[in-house]
Image (cartoon, helix red, strand yellow):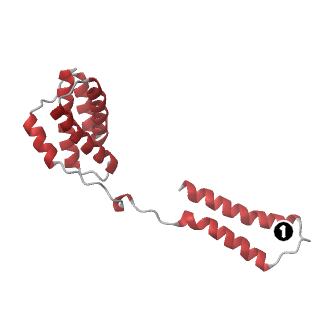
Amino acid sequence: MKERRSVAFLAGGLCFLVAAFRMIAPEIPFDWMTLTLVLAAAAALMLPALTVRPNVTEMETNPIDLVPLTRRMAQIGWKAGSGGLFDALLALFDHNPFSALCAARGMIAMLSAKAELSPATAETLDMLTDALDSASGNGKHSTDAGDVQTLFSHAMRALGMLDAQT
C-alpha cells in the first residue's frame, strides 16, 4: 500500500509539473506528443504498484508432520514443567496461542544452549524446534489450531525437561 501511494504521488507530481510548467511559461511550445509521453511515463510508473500480490491464503505453507515428533515425545515421557514461568506461558497461551508457541520456541533455544544434552535428547529437541520453526514460518493464520495445541504441549514438556536439567 505504501508503494502504491508513493508511485501515485510520483505520477501525479509528474503530471502536475508539466501543467505548472505550461502555466509559468506559456510561450514554450507544447504539443500533444509531449502530453502523450508524459502520461505514458506516469502510467509506466504506476504499473508496478497496481500489480496484484498473492493473498496470504494463496501462499505456499510448509506442512508440519507431527506424527514422528508425537511418537518420539510419547516414548521419551518428559513431564511438563511447573512454576511461574510455565504459568505465565499457559496464561499467554489462553490469550494468544500462537504467541505463546513462539515464546516457548525462544525459551527452548535459550535453555538448550545452557544444558548438556544427550544425543537422543538433542535429536528430539531438533525435531521439535524444526516443527516450531515451520509453524512460525507459516504464520498465525496458516497454522492449524490443533497443530498449535500439539506443538505447545510438546514445547511445555521439553521446557520442563530443560528446566529440570539446569
Point out residue 20 in the picture as x, y percentages from the top left corner. 81, 64
Point out residue 108 in the picture as x, y percentages from the top left corner. 27, 32
The C terminus sits in image quarter: top left
Point out residue 160 in the picture as x, y percentages from the top left corner. 18, 27
Q: Amino acid at mark 1?
A: Arg
Q: Residue furthest top?
A: 166
Q: Which residue is at a point 12% across and 31% down the rendered structure image?
A: 78
The tally of labels here is 1
Judged left or right of residue 27, residue 66 is left
Residue 74 visible, this orientation: yes
Q: Which residue is mark 1?
A: 22
Q: Nearer the viewer, residue 106 or 152?
A: 106
Q: Which residue is at a point 17% across and 27% down the rendered structure image?
A: 161
Q: Residue furthest front?
A: 119
Q: Is residue 3 above or below residue 166?
A: below
Quarter of the image where one finds residue 23: bottom right
Q: Secondary structure at mark 1?
A: helix
Residue 139 visible, this orientation: no
Q: Nearer the viewer, residue 18 or 77?
A: 77
Quarter of the image where one finds residue 159: top left
Q: Is residue 66 above or below residue 83?
A: below
Judged left or right of residue 75, residue 28 is right
Q: Which residue is at a point 31% across and 28% down the rendered structure image?
A: 110
Point out residue 59 in the picture as x, y percentages from the top left corner. 36, 60
Q: Residue furthest bottom?
A: 32
Q: Which residue is at a point 16% across and 44% down the rendered structure image?
A: 69
Q: Nearer the viewer, residue 126 or 158?
A: 126
